Image (cartoon, rainbow, N blue to C red):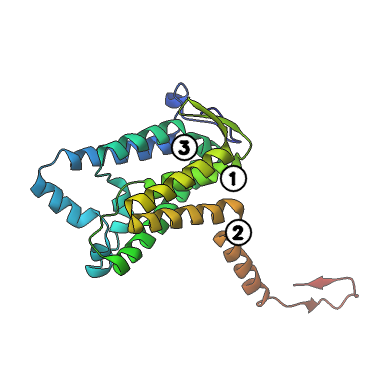
């Protein structure tokens, strides 16, 4: 996928690669930890899953809230792991160059948290045993972000299908919806939709928590200020 964002400046070791540092870090961590899990025996898998994998029972029954974060670093399906690796290598660097590494990683954190939390709440309502794993919420959220930021940008999806960024986004959303309905994957589906919704809010500017905080801080500071007459003339005042 060939597009150019506003920011470059990769580490010298990565200049000849198509991947950026943040995307490479996520790829390295997810693939590494997932392979450790997949190559473990059943007893080790069960022990590991009880501490790192999120589900409604884990999060709200046992109050293992940290699993809402750790579960994104473990993919229990090998085919999904390969898909994530391809997307992180070929697709995510475009967004990281646009935002910079810090904002890119924060986007990954917020969308994964939103998706995992929503899915765990859905599991609480529909049945608490469904495991919620992997970077799927972030992956689909990033595709929505790409469709907004690069709506008219021509892309080659996996080097085969020519389309625009918006068309790719619509196609992926339709595919996700079809996957949810046909597979009756309601718990996981709620998580995907929540992550994509948060992505739209963040990228479209509808949700700006930092701006809201700065505005609140400014208003709070103004309440502690007053105008003092310096006693010289009407043109000289001091806060």
x, y percentage for residue 50?
18, 57
Q: Is residue 138 above or below residue 91?
A: below
Give residue 130's mark: none
Lower sequence index among marks 1 and 3: 3
Left or right: where does residue 114 sit relative to residue 163?
Answer: left
Residue designated by label 3: 92
Mark 1, mark 2: which one is toward the viewer? 1
Taking the image as drawn, is residue 64 in sight?
A: no
Locate the C terminus by quadrant: bottom right
Residue designated by label 2: 206
x, y percentage for residue 10?
49, 30
Given residues 218 and 44, the one toward you in this image is 44
Q: Residues within 10 Å of mark 3 (few under 14, many from 20)?
A: many
Mark 1, mark 3: which one is toward the viewer? 1
x, y percentage for residue 167?
56, 39
Residue at the location (64% across, 37% down)? 152
Residue designated by label 1: 148
């Amino acid at each position: 996928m060939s597009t150019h964002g506003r920011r470059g400046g990769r580490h010298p070791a990565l200049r000849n690669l198509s991947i950026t540092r943040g995307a490479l870090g996520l790829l390295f961590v997810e693939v590494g930890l997932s392979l450790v899990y997949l190559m473990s025996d059943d007893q080790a898998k069960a022990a590991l899953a009880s501490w790192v994998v999120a589900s409604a029972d884990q999060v709200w029954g046992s109050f293992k809230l940290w699993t809402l974060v750790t579960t994104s670093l473990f993919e229990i399906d090998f085919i999904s792991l390969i898909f994530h690796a391809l997307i992180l290598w070929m697709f995510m660097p475009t967004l990281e160059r646009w935002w910079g590494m810090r904002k890119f990683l924060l986007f990954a954190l917020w969308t994964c948290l939103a998706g995992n939390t929503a899915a765990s709440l859905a599991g609480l309502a529909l049945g608490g045993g469904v495991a919620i794993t992997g970077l799927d919420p972030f992956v689909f959220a990033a595709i929505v972000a790409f469709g907004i930021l690069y709506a008219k940008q021509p892309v080659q999806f996996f080097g085969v299908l020519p389309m625009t960024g918006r068309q790719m986004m619509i196609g992926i959303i339709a595919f996700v919806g079809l996957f949810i309905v046909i597979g009756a994957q309601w718990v996981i589906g709620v998580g995907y939709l929540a992550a994509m919704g948060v992505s739209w809010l963040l990228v479209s500017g509808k949700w700006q928590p930092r701006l809201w905080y700065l505005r609140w801080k400014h208003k709070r500071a103004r309440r502690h200020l007053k105008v003092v007459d310096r006693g010289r003339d009407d043109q000289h005042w001091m806060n």
